[in-house]
Image: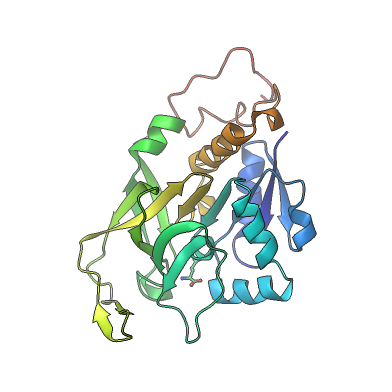
Amino acid sequence: MAVVGVLALQGSYNEHMSALRRIGVKGVEVRKPEQLHGLDSLIIPGGESTTMAKLANYHNLFPALREFVGAGKPVWGTCAGLIFLANKAVGQKLGGQELVGGLDCTVHRNFFGSQLQSFETELSVPMLAEKEGGSNTCRGVFIRAPAILEVGSDVEILAECPVPSGRPSITIPSAEGVEEEVYSKDRVIVAVRQGNILATAFHPELTSDCRWHRFFLDMDRESHPKAFSALSLSSSSRGSEGGSKTKPFDLPIFE
Ligand SMILES: NC(=O)CC[C@H](N)C(=O)O
């Protein structure tokens, strides 16, 4: 059975652990580099990316995290986790912060504004519905959320969000170091996939909809099918919130 690590330095790791439990998957809390060995995939939760980066540095986790991503194992970053995985982040604190990288995109750390400008909205997610069943939308919980400004050609866009009208305008340094306004579009990217990397600017682990977790586990399954024996990780719950997919008749494992 696949073993999914959840980086447990700070932030919403408990919520990811319980979402994994809901779909019958074993989650393992990761705080040290050696705990990454033997994992099939990894979730980097939301939280506060600067604090998380300091803790990751303290535990000497960055080289091991980069190696994990580079090995092609599935990695999912939610919110602060997305910032960790981006190749480039803007809107950071002075001096920036260390990133794991791997995801070919530029992320703005606090695109939607301050904690007070946190919000929930329905996101259109046709691809998620196609793969995991259920409604064409999902609830997006955005907490002092980042957003993706630009993506490379290998990055598949899975969800976009209308830019709220009250959002403060953002500036990023140009190549010459001069401040310039860059974002004027009315939509922004909030979920992407690039090969083994999944990233969401919002928090599916704070909702009861497990489809993003299932989607991630399906990526995991695709990357090494042997870890998934006849015990279907989601056979117990696929169909409850996922909706229309019928359960394979030969896999009535957990009822
Ligand atoms: N909910 C979150 O993970 C917020 C992330 C936050 N914008 C940061 O920079 O870390």
Going by the picture, which residue comes out furthest to the top?
249
Q: Nearer the viewer, residue 212 or 134?
A: 212
Instruction: Name the image quarter holding residue 222.
Output: top right
Q: Dividing the picture into quarters, in which one does residue 32 lie?
A: bottom right
Toward the viewer: 155 or 118?
155
In the displayed structure image, the side of residue 237 where residue 86 appears, left or right:
left
- Residue sitting at 58 percent across and 31 percent down? 237
Q: Residue at x 62, y 45 (%)?
A: 73
In the rendered structure, the answer to whether residue 66 lies left or right of residue 30 reads left
| Residue 49 pos. (x, y %) | 54, 71
Taking the image as drawn, is residue 241 in sight?
Answer: yes
> In this rendering, is residue 249 above or below 4?
above
Q: Is residue 133 visible?
A: no
Image-based side of 48 in relation to 153, left or right? right
User: How far across and how far down the image is residue 81, in percent?
Assistant: 54, 61
The N terminus is located in which quarter? top right
**Rendered location of residue 72, percent (x, y):** 59, 46
Residue 235 image offset from top left, x and y in percent = 61, 26
Against 54, residue 143 (above or below) is above
Residue 244 or 177: which is nearer the viewer? 177
